[in-house]
Image: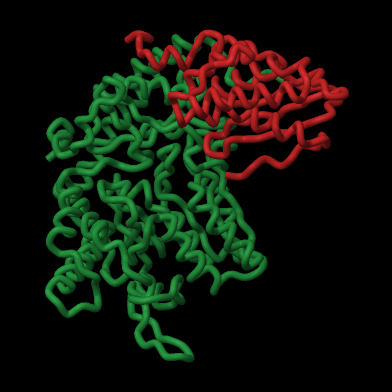
Chain colours: A red, B green
Amino acid sequence: MSIAEPQFDELYREVILDHYRKPRNAGSLGSPTHFAEGANPVCGDEIQLDVSIEGDVICEMAFRGQGCSISQSSASMMTERICGGTIADAHRIMQLFEALLLESAEPDPALGDLEALQGVAKFPVRVKCALLSWKVLKEALENTNTEPIAPQGG
Amino acid sequence: MSIQPAQLRKDFPILERQINGHPLAYLDNAATTQKPRPVIESLVHYYETQNANIHRGIHTLAVEATKAYEDVRAKASKHIGATNTEDIVFTRNTTESLNLVARAWGDANLQEDDEIVLSLMEHHSNIVPWQLLAARTGARLRYADIAPNGLLQIDSLRKMIGNRTKLVSITHMSNVLGTINPIAEIAEMTHAVGALLIVDGAQSAPHLPVDVNQLGCDVFAFSAHKMLGPTGVGVLWARPGLLAEMDPFLGGGEMISIVRPEGSTWAEGPHKFEAGTPNIADVIAFGTALDYLHDLGMENVREHEKHITAYAIDALESSGGITVHGPRDIEARGGAVSFEVDGVHPHDVSTIVDAYGIAIRAGHHCAQLLMRYLNVPATNRASFYIYNEEHEVDALLNALEEAKRMFGNVDSRTAV
């Protein structure tokens, strides 16, 4: 048996496995200004996200979590792409990424490595894995408290 | 005669499907089983020749439909060795059967500080109805532990069952570990303190010979769709006399005797719990599924599953980097086999093996308490039935090799 399943190659691109093996920005921030956490109740993927914002710039991000390669690599790539930009940039990237997965839009060059997750759009059951960290980011940007929130039930 | 899966497969049209260019290997039978042609035809036959509402009509179709529906009560009763056909209630599924008991018996019999005893290996459908009951009544929940070998810790359970215990609800067979629990022994402990024993038979009724009198339980619940039947039909059996003690769960047509402005009286027997037009067609097709199973013989079903389960556990354990959960003693377990592949998250495993046409389940299997106990976020589960063959297990193992090769050594938890 070989990896010659075409769809399959598109899903597990090497850059995804690389982020899964060596997650960027994994861990915690000493004193984040923003925090959120989330889970996919159906499958148990979890992400906790610390964010530090100064003015309108996202200076630092760190995440902790457990789950499949898609959910964890998406979180890793997200922190890499979003960190250092403005909040408005983050929202713009988020929209481009959601369009990529939910509307099968052509990847915008602004997405960088995140383009690798394009193949997930062909696996509808896995789309929620890729979007989990983004849902958490959206919440974190709305939250200023850093108290952990009770996990969602399911 | 022993089961010949290669022959039986011809009865299951769906098994001819190709998935992603490979023959379907359906190993998700604990979730739902596939349906043989006679069951599918029985649905068509009913709608084409007998369709009518039951229990009220005088016309020929109504009489035929009523008889066909009521005949299944006898078949379901016989399937679990029950004495009295009138102790069988049709519901939507096991979950509804358990909720019915929680409402109709639980609300009337539990009060503050009473205790409900469950185990950590229960499916959410045998946890949440009791949590709701506890919230309504002020009763407390207790959970019996599991031993490292995947068996229920019977001593932990024995200590937990006491004077405050009003009901014990335990699965006959775990949908994750495959563990078969010693129900007769648990019935003795439960009855010694005057409590009610409820058994979740969703995983046992399809796979084992079941005799509720030998088990000694007070309530037994199971689902048609996990045993060749259609979705939307569940069974609730209660020991003789118990249904009569319970008030109705839902009110409406079919379940009344006399309706007056100031109040009503209830229909006798199981009809009291079957308000509204029931799932007539699917109940009738479930009867065909029961006939199919009984032609095979439940002893033979069990023997076949023991064989294929032992083969699968042996193959998984011989392959490096795979951890199998649950008992190894084949007599103490059924055909739901949960496992983990080192460094590959179950979602990724499931997606990869699906590319080879293999259907397994990944996730928490509606058993989050058990996942927490096993200290895993999710597992993979292969589960077997009468039509599964060794070559499907071999195909699974080959696909798992591919998953291992793709992922190499990766820790599935992000470092902190």
Give the image location of residue A55, x and y in percent. Answer: 87, 24
Q: Quadrant of the C terminus of chain B?
A: top right
The answer to which quarter of the image holds residue A99 is top right
Q: Which of the two residues, A90 or B135, is positioned nearer the viewer here?
A: A90
Q: Quadrant of the N terminus of chain B?
A: top left
Q: Answer left or right for B40 relative to B180.
A: left
Identity of the residue drawn at 38% across and 30% down: B360
Q: Is residue B279 above or below residue A78?
A: below
Q: Answer left or right for B332 relative to A46.
A: left
Q: Answer left or right for A140 relative to A66.
A: right
Q: Is residue B55 above or below residue A147?
A: below
Identity of the residue drawn at 38% across and 71% down: B273
The answer to which quarter of the image holds residue B80 is bottom left
| Number of on-image labels | 0
Q: Which of the two residues, A117 or B114, is positioned nearer the viewer here?
A: A117
Give the image location of residue A34, x and y in percent. Answer: 80, 30
Q: Answer left or right for B334 relative to B118.
A: left
Q: Which of the two residues, B89 or B82, is positioned nearer the viewer here?
A: B89
Q: Is residue B343 visible?
A: no
Give the image location of residue B250, x and y in percent. Answer: 44, 71
Q: Is residue A81 visible?
A: yes
Give the image location of residue B237, x and y in percent. Answer: 35, 64
Identity of the residue drawn at 44% across and 55% down: B95
Identity of the residue drawn at 20% across and 70% down: B66
